[in-house]
Image (cartoon, coloured by chain):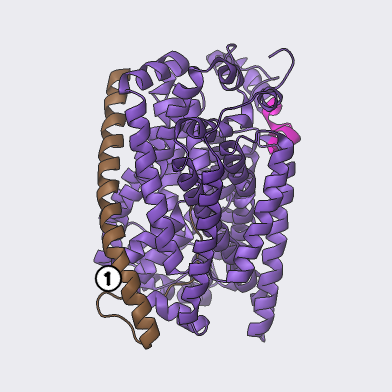
């Protein structure tokens, strides 16, 4: 690249895009109509109570539309497409595992059925009923910290999509786009309040579903299967098909994905709500069994788009030197731009506008939900429990709105400052697991083991938090990679362990996300057991907890 | 496992998933439109529509 980074080289290139005036018009009209419809539908909601009543009146098809619309954000499309671009078909293993685990949970009712029996609506509510108020506050704090950190890259990733399809590939343009998008997010959220009402969710589903299917069919017709497979074989070799050989994956990563798939089904807030709000246990099982299809598609479609981006870019020398350097080096975060650039060059004018409008709407819906969610968790589960006399409704609303604005500003600062240094999916998975590694241990033993104690719950949360070392900048800052490499070399001096340090260079060695994820997973489970045995709950508290647990399931010792 | 076997697995999953999703999306778009109309009518009339009900939900975490 002649000393230039891939990002600098891309800025100099004139990247072709079919995004034109008609597409701009489509995006603007869609946003105006979508917001207008949301505001119009609100006239039917006389107060916040009516919003909940509307929720009770949701029929099944509208329910499915809203679930899919809210579960698939633009950031999902971005991180999945990046994985597809960097690892070819191997990325499909994550969708396969997520779908299989959801099916197994649906068939067995593991964790979700006991949660349905207990009737809790939020995970922190379970903590309080099983272990006490302080566990609720501690768990809620880690949940919010992890969730906000997890959301930290949304603004950057979404702005990368929007600027890339519009042919604006410089860092300066990205920063401007991020700022404009943040302002739009705040206007959308504050003006509309709960604008993502059912009507707009339905409209978003229609545009999104048509966009996903039509774009995928277009790509399948445009590139022959033979061309796609041959290109992936030439560029990504065997690692493009076999996840155990892919550079970003490997055995530990695949196993970690199994753990993540399980958590996505059992511990994530939406899953708990779905389990709790189902009419019967049969409905819980059916929801998770059918949910497998949703898991499969929401990852596989963008993976396929990322794979098609390999084919598009491989056939264009100027783009190839940016995204697929001949020396095989990793071009870094810029690979996030591969899919949108490919789609902007492939889809005809008009179609790219509709797709962008759908993705934009998906992003807005996600921001709306996340900003409300994390501000609500911080207000209800972290701040409010500190006030024994309670907070007035008005104070809570003001507090929630202040937190919302603070989170929005954090998104801009974090997106501009944080050096990603790893796949966006890995960032999402690591920041998510900071919370749910401990949460899974607390839920699992809290439901199925009578002797699980408060001390065990605190220990499990603390161990889960250690998973943050899987973030590339944290590893670099703490010097952990060098430390681990040195330790491996020391161990290799022991007779019989020489193979441990094979190919480990202390200068370039990096602890893989899979290894760190699995280690913290095991440590959290172990800590829950060990600390529960070492420091059991006092008899009175244990009896109360067991009473809460006994209503859940036949709790076993 | 042989590369061809991996490819066969991924192709089956991809095509099967896309076909199933297309069918589901078509059904949801068609019947969901009727649900939206019924919902708005019921809210305007101050009553709930007949048919399936869902328990009240709180704003929750979206998995993205």
Residue in the image at 67% along x and 71% along y: A401
Colour applied to chain A = purple
**Quadrant holding the N terminus of chain A:** top right
Residue in the image at 71% along x and 39% along y: A173
Left or right: residue A323 compared with residue A314: right
Relative to A511, is A47 above or below? below
- Numbered marks: total: 1
A550 or A424, which lies in front? Answer: A424
Left or right: residue A200 compared with residue A322: left
A389 or A496, which lies in front? Answer: A389
User: Label 1 is found on which chain of the structure?
Assistant: A
Label 1 sits on residue:
A280
- Magenta segment, principal secondary structure? helix
Residue in the image at 44% along x and 42% along y: A351
Residue in the image at 33% along x and 53% along y: A291
Relative to B30, is A418 above or below? above
Colour applied to chain B = brown
Q: Residues within 10 Å of mark 1 (few under 14, many from 20)?
A: some
Magenta residues, start to end: A473-483
Q: Is residue A554 visible?
A: no
């Amino acid at each position: 690249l002649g000393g230039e980074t891939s990002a600098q080289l891309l800025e100099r290139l004139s990247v072709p895009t079919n995004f034109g005036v008609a597409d701009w018009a489509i995006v603007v009209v869609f946003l105006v109509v979508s917001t207008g419809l949301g505001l119009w539908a609100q006239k039917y909601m006389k107060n916040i109570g009516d919003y909940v009543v509307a929720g009770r009146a949701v029929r099944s098809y509208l329910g499915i539309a809203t679930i899919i619309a809210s579960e698939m954000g633009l950031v999902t499309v971005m991180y999945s497409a990046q994985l597809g671009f960097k690892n070819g078909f191997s990325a499909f293993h994550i969708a396969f595992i997520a779908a299989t685990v959801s099916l197994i949970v649906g068939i067995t009712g593991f964790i979700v059925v006991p949660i349905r029996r207990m009737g809790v609506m939020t995970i922190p509510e379970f903590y309080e009923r099983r272990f006490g108020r302080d566990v609720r506050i501690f768990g809620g704090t880690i949940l919010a910290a992890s969730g906000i950190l997890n959301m930290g890259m949304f603004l950057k990733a979404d702005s990368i999509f929007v600027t890339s399809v519009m042919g604006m590939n410089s860092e300066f343009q990205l920063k401007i786009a991020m700022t404009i998008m943040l302002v739009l997010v705040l206007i959308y959220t504050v003006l509309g309040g709960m604008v993502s009402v059912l009507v707009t969710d339905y409209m978003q589903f229609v545009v999104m579903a048509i966009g996903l299917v039509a774009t995928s069919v277009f790509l399948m017709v445009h590139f022959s299967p033979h061309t796609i497979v041959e290109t992936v074989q030439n560029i990504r070799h065997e690692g493009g098909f076999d996840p155990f050989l892919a550079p970003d994956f490997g055995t530990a990563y695949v196993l970690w994905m199994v753990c993540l798939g399980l958590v996505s089904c059992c511990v994530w807030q939406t899953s708990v709500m779905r389990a709790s709000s189902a009419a019967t246990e049969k409905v819980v099982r059916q929801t998770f069994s059918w949910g497998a299809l949703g898991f499969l598609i929401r990852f596989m479609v963008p993976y396929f788009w990322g794979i098609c981006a390999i084919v598009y870019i491989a056939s264009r020398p100027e783009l190839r030197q940016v995204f697929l350097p001949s020396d095989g080096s990793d071009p870094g975060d810029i690979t996030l731009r591969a899919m949108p650039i490919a789609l902007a060059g492939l889809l005809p004018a008009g179609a790219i506008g509709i797709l962008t409008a759908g993705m934009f709407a998906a992003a807005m819906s996600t921001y709306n939900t996340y900003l409300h969610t994390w501000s609500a968790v911080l207000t209800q589960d972290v701040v409010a429990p500190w006030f024994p006399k309670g907070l007035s409704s008005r104070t809570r609303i003001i507090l929630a709105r202040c937190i919302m604005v603070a989170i929005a500003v954090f998104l801009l600062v974090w997106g501009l400052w944080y050096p990603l240094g790893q796949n966006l999916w890995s960032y999402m998975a690591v920041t998510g697991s900071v919370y749910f590694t401990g949460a899974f241990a607390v839920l699992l033993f809290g439901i199925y083991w009578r002797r699980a104690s408060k001390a065990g719950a605190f220990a499990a949360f603390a161990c889960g938090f250690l998973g943050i070392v899987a973030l590339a900048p944290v590893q670099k800052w703490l010097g952990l990679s060098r430390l681990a490499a040195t330790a491996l070399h020391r161990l290799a001096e022991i007779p019989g362990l020489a193979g441990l340090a094979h190919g480990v260079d202390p200068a370039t060695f990096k602890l893989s996300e899979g290894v760190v994820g699995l280690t913290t997973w095991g440590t959290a489970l172990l800590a829950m057991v060990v600390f529960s045995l070492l420091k059991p709950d006092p008899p009175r508290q244990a009896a109360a907890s067991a009473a809460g647990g006994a209503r859940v399931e036949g709790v076993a010792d | 496992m042989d590369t061809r076997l991996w490819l066969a697995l991924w192709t089956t999953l991809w095509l099967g998933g896309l076909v199933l999703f297309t069918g589901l999306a078509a059904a949801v778009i068609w019947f969901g439109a009727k649900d939206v109309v019924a919902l708005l009518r019921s809210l305007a009339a101050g009553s709930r529509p007949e048919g399936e009900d869902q328990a009240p939900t709180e704003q929750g975490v979206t998995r993205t």
